[in-house]
Image (cartoon, helix red, strand yellow):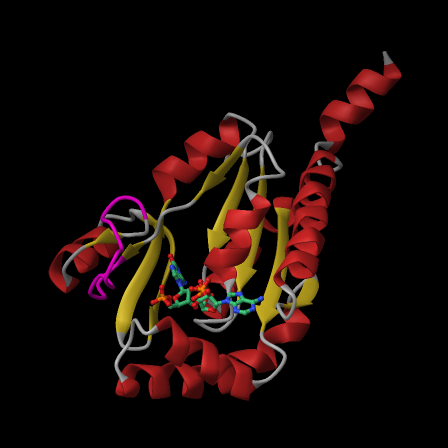
Amino acid sequence: MEFQKGAILILSGPSGCGKSTLLKEVYKHIEDYYFSISTTTRNPRVGEQNGVDYYFTTKEEFEKGIESGEFLEYAKVHDNYYGTSLKPINEALSQGKLVIFDIDVQGHEIVREKLDSIVTSVFITTPSLKVLDERLKARNTDDIEVIEKRLKNAKIEINSIDKYDYFLVNDDLIEASSKLVSIAKIARIKASLFDKDFIVKNWLN
Ligand code: ADP
Ligand code: 5GP
């Protein structure tokens, strides 16, 4: 794969921990990034827009995409499919962009296996499960059964923190977003170190 110029930043963490809110802050301080819009079979929440938050699709269409090799990675999360299409990621990386993913722990493992040298990852969570519960309820976008499912999944996902480069507690928004800006900047530097052949060839000249 010709993925030399760009870098990848993966954010994972329980639904409701504040990934989207943090990213809005981070975007004010970084440049030349591309947020990977995932495809999902879950229903849009109030206020979510097709092609902005997600590409919303049916289970049948998603499964066709799996068969035709459309996805860099995909996973079943809370009984719905979620996946990252390969083509736009390829394009953004070849343009040297910092590609930002909001994907679950299963997706993180797959992308790591495929593109390890240009990946930096961060697991984000709330100070406690109780705070997560409060945030999900305050967000007021999901039914109580959906919230229960997300909390159950969060208890499992937290066990994967050691597979990530960074662990970030989103308590104070400004403090957490400032740390995330630093991680986003270092993600680029890490990826640039891995074009070893290019560096060595030029250094010898
Ligand atoms: P995610 O994208 O991880 O599912 P959201 O960004 O939608 O989570 O955040 C979930 C809820 O928590 C939202 O209502 C948001 O306003 C709130 N929130 C996010 N970060 C904080 C924070 N640091 N302190 C308090 N509330 C927060
Ligand atoms: P939500 O329904 O709250 O938007 O997302 C639920 C979970 O799915 C979150 O953990 C989110 O990170 C994950 N997710 C979103 N898009 C993708 C994707 O393309 N691939 C994978 N593996 N997970 C995703």
Name the foreground residue: 177 vs 120. 177
> Visible in this render: residue 2?
no
Query: Looking at this view, is 141 or 69 the one in front?
Result: 141
Any magenta on residue 12? no
Left or right of residue 70, residue 182 in this image = right
Q: Is residue 92 above or below residue 135?
A: above
- Residue ID at (25%, 64%): 45
Vertical side of 1 occupied by 115: above or below: below
Residue in the image at 52% along x and 51% along y:
23
Q: Is residue 6 above or below residue 84?
A: above
Q: Main secondary structure of the magenta part?
A: loop
The percent position of residue 203, horizontal first and vertical second, equals 86, 19
Where's residue 158, x and y in %?
A: 57, 80
> Percent from the top left, x then y, of residue 13?
52, 69
Please count the marks in the image. 0
Q: Is residue 153 above or below residue 38?
A: below
Q: Is residue 187 left or right of residue 14?
A: right
Quarter of the image for the C terminus: give it: top right
Left-right relation of 156 to 84: right
Can you tell which quarter of the image residue 160 is in?
bottom right
Instruction: Kindly identify the residue that appears in the image at 57 percent across and 39 percent down.
Output: 28
Left or right: 2, with 145 as reference point: right
Residue drawn at x 52%, y 41% is 99
Q: Which residues are magenta?
A: 40-52
